[in-house]
Amino acid sequence: MSDYLKEDKKKRLKGNLIKIIIILLVFLCLILSYITYDNINISDYSNNENVVIEKTIQTIDGLKEKDKTVIDMIQSIKESIVGISKVKNTGNSIFSADNISDLGLGTGVIVSDNGYILTNAHVSRRKI
């Protein structure tokens, strides 16, 4: 019976020691956090003389000019958009006796003068 009491006392002592170590570690972390955040300097930028604030006046003519450039840009891009439809016969497979055809439908953008088209992988069925 005394062996059981000795083991029980050792377990309680070990458990209490672990609790004390955890409490000390948490306390140490709190102290280090306080020291770290206490030493952070926050500058007051409201008194900084190097800050320059520039006012811009927006006019109707300026908005019309911006709209023209956006409209021109959209029209030039619209001319390079193309529709794509592709049917590819992949041939016979060892798993199936019939021909398998892949169909790709979608849109693309002509990106060069010699006709390169940029499109998504689901349209071209090209695995990257």
Image: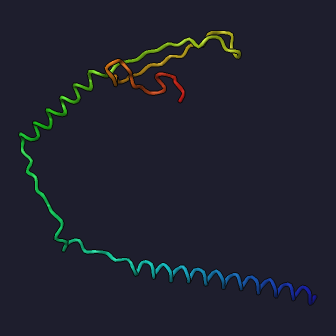
Residue nearest the observer in this picture, 120 or 15: 120
| 17 is higher (above) or lower (below) than 84 | below
Q: Position of residue 78 (x, y in %)?
A: 26, 24
> Which residue, as the protein is rendered here, is positioned at the far front?
114
Quarter of the image where one finds residue 6: bottom right
Quarter of the image where one finds residue 101: top right
Using residue 80 as the reference point, say whether residue 50 is left or right of it: left
Q: Position of residue 110 (x, y in %)?
A: 34, 22
| 40 is higher (above) or lower (below) than 54 | below
- The residue at the point 54 percent across, 27 percent down is 127
Using residue 97 as the reference point, say whether residue 1 is left or right of it: right
- The residue at the point 22 percent across, 25 percent down is 75
Quadrant that contains the N terminus: bottom right
Using residue 34 as the reference point, say whether residue 28 is left or right of it: right
> Which residue, as the protein is rendered here, is positioned at the far top?
98
Q: Position of residue 25 (x, y in %)?
A: 60, 81
Residue nearest the observer in this picture, 119 or 7: 119
